[in-house]
Image (spheres, grey):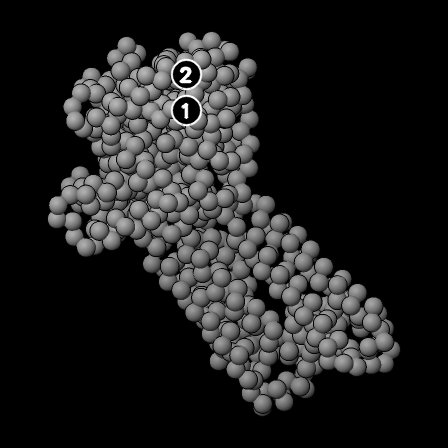
């Protein structure tokens, strides 16, 4: 991947593949036994399905006929196919160490021995199930990840609901067409036929036409599969952790850490988002902010607090991820955080750069700043002015107007942002935030910026909103005004935004760009039609910032697709079922704002 060289030079690239060093309390990769067991269970599932596809031995059926009715044999065959499919599905849960997946695999291996014999005296297949059971029992200690305590009850409810619906519909189909039956069977046989249909087995009823039998079988069989599938999915569902678990006392502790150590990372203040949880070091001197999304425990930025306690917080977070079967990942950490996460066993790769402007050295003079200088002049000639002020110094009426304008200027119905977005504006607790308000010649508010504190001497851009009907140059005017006003606010540096894979665009524009780099550049430009990749880079680059690398940390390359989906959902580029229940986000007199897109 382009851009890894800088990470290597910074000492962050890891060649050991993410395996923690000896003595580490947590291993990011699944132990070899656990990953191997998952593959073997899936292979056993495929083998089980193949035995269902193959015709039974004639001699075996003749012997079974003396002990079991043909209905029982056919039921065993249908159940064998379902158990094989479930074993294949369980592989992912076993790889994550799910205790519930292990228990279900043990159950399926146990009944598999019986089913293989009952479907045709297939002793070889039964022996395979027995060997699988013995292996699972031998490695039981590898599977300790807890399950959401609500999952078993939800699984039971789903199974009962779908099975009950299938049974009821099957009974109705029979009852509504009794004239299609051969003879006059009673209700007991109706119920037996509908129940057997749930597992794909033929019942005792005989129909005058094959279509009637198929209609009942398809209805009951489909609901039977739905019942088993839904119950399994719910049983193996990722354990959830709601943001409601975060307490006011934790917020106070976090703000104290930010007061003492907030200068270390420009993303630190965003840990105050109310959809983020905190994993604390045992000493309480550091914390990892994170959120659980689709089985990924997604942390952002560097750990917060005393660097000597970072490793304690990271190890606690990793241990918690392992205990719940979550995939740990870190989005947007800096070099210091990347080294700490790498020492704890994660792989590290550069994903982009953060634009940081030195307020003291900033100037609009010179050819590189010509475009910005002209945009600012254009806005000023049109009568636009900007005001830079701390939120706590803004009158309540003006603050309320800024909140309303930010909502009004939002581009589209979806609020985006996670790693570099606070998710609110106007909260009295955020009095140190800096607002930039742009008014036109008629005193109408046409643009709003919000910067969050970056320690004592920095600001980090959170919100950028402008009226689309305003003159071109409003954004440049507000950004330049913030930079020029920074020294008067005691601010020496401003973090503007994050540019994903910036080095690809920068190197592709230079001489000597190779074919691979050019292809990679074209792909990113194509992706920019859907996501603001290139536009964010261009918007930042024109201020001539200093680029500071940001990194992604992850256990193994195999986890990257899952992590990518979690990141896209966190940043609201993909829909998510997360309930937006943020109690008390706003201030007493000013409503809160949901996650905001910057740029």
Compared to 453, does 280 lie above or below? below
Residue furthest to the left in view is 512
- Residue 474 lies left or right of residue 237; in this view the side is left
| Residue at x-position 53% and y-position 64% | 86
Secondary structure at badge 1 equals loop
The answer to whether residue 467 is seen in the rendering is yes
Relative side of 570 to 540, left or right: right
Discs 2, 1 touching: Cβ within 8 Å: yes
Q: Quadrant of residue 511?
A: top left
Residue drawn at x 22%, y 32% as measured from the top left? 547
Q: Quadrant of residue 205?
A: bottom right
Sequence-first disc among 2 and 1: 2
The circle on residue 179 is: none
Q: Which residue is mark 1?
A: 470
Can residue 256 be seen in the rendering of this structure? no
Between 267 and 309, the residue placed more toward the observer is 267
Image height of 335 relative to 516, above or below: above
Which residue is painted at 83% across and 71% down in the image?
A: 177
Circle count: 2
Horizontally, residue 334 falls left or right of residue 467, namely: left
Q: Residue 440's mark? A: 2
Give x and y (percent) for residue 437. Answer: 40, 17
Q: Residue drawn 18% across and 28% down?
A: 368
Near-viewer residue (21 or 223): 223
Characterize the local packing of mark 1: few (<14), some (14-19) or many (20 or more) Cα atoms within 10 angstroms: some
């Amino acid at each position: 991947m382009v851009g890894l060289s800088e990470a290597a030079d910074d000492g962050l690239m890891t060649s050991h593949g993410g395996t923690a060093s000896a003595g580490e309390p947590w291993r990011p990769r699944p132990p070899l036994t656990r990953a191997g067991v998952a593959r073997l269970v899936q292979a056993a599932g495929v083998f089980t399905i193949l035995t269902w596809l193959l015709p039974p031995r004639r001699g075996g059926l003749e012997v079974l006929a003396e002990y079991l009715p043909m209905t029982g044999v056919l039921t065993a065959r249908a159940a064998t196919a379902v158990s094989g499919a479930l074993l294949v599905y369980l592989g992912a849960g076993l790889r994550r160490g799910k205790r519930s997946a292990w228990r279900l695999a043990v159950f399926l291996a146990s009944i598999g021995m019986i089913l293989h014999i009952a479907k045709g005296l297939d002793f070889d297949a039964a022996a395979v199930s027995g060997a699988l059971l013995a292996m699972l029992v031998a490695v039981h200690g590898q599977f300790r990840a807890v399950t959401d305590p609500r999952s078993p009850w939800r699984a039971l409810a789903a199974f009962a609901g779908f099975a009950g619906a299938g049974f009821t519909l099957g009974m109705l189909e029979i009852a509504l067409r009794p004239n299609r039956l051969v003879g006059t069977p009673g209700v007991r046989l109706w119920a037996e036929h509908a129940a057997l249909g749930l597992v794909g087995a033929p019942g005792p009823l005989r129909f005058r036409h094959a279509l009637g039998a198929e209609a009942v079988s398809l209805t009951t069989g489909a609901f039977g599969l739905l019942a088993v599938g839904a119950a399994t999915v719910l049983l193996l569902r990722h354990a959830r952790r709601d943001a409601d678990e975060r307490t006011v006392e934790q917020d106070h502790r976090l703000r104290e850490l930010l007061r003492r150590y907030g200068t270390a990372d420009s993303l630190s203040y965003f840990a105050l988002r109310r959809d983020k949880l905190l994993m604390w070091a045992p000493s309480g001197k550091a914390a990892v902010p994170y959120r659980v999304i689709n089985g990924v425990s997604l942390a952002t930025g560097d750990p917060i607090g005393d660097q000597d306690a970072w490793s304690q917080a990271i190890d606690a977070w990793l241990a918690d991820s392992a205990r719940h079967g979550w995939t740990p990942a870190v989005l947007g950490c800096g070099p210091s955080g990347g080294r700490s996460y790498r020492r704890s066993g994660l792989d590290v790769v550069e994903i982009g750069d953060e634009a940081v402007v030195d307020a003291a050295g900033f100037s609009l003079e010179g050819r590189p700043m010509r475009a910005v200088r002209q945009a600012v002049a254009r806005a000023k000639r049109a009568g636009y002015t900007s005001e830079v002020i701390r939120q706590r110094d803004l009158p309540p009426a003006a603050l309320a107007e800024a909140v309303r304008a930010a909502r009004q200027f939002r581009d589209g119905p979806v609020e985006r942002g996670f790693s570099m977005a606070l998710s609110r504006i106007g909260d009295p607790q955020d009095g140190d935030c800096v607002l930039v308000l742009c008014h036109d010649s008629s005193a109408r508010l046409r643009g709003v910026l919000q910067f969050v504190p970056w320690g004592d001497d920095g600001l980090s851009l959170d919100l950028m909103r402008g009226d689309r009907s305003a003159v071109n140059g409003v954004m440049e005017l507000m950004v330049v005004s913030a930079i020029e006003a920074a020294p008067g606010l005691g601010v020496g540096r401003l973090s503007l935004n994050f540019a994903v894979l910036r080095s690809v665009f920068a190197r592709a524009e230079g001489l000597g760009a190779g074919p691979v780099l050019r292809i990679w550049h074209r792909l990113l430009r194509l992706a920019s039609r859907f996501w603001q990749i290139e536009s964010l880079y261009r918007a930042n680059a024109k201020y001539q910032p200093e680029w500071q690398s940001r990194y992604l940390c992850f256990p193994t390359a195999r986890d990257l697709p899952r992590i990518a989906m979690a990141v896209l959902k966190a940043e609201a580029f993909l829909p998510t079922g997360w309930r937006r229940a943020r109690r008390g986000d706003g201030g007493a007199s000013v409503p809160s704002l949901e996650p905001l897109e910057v740029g």
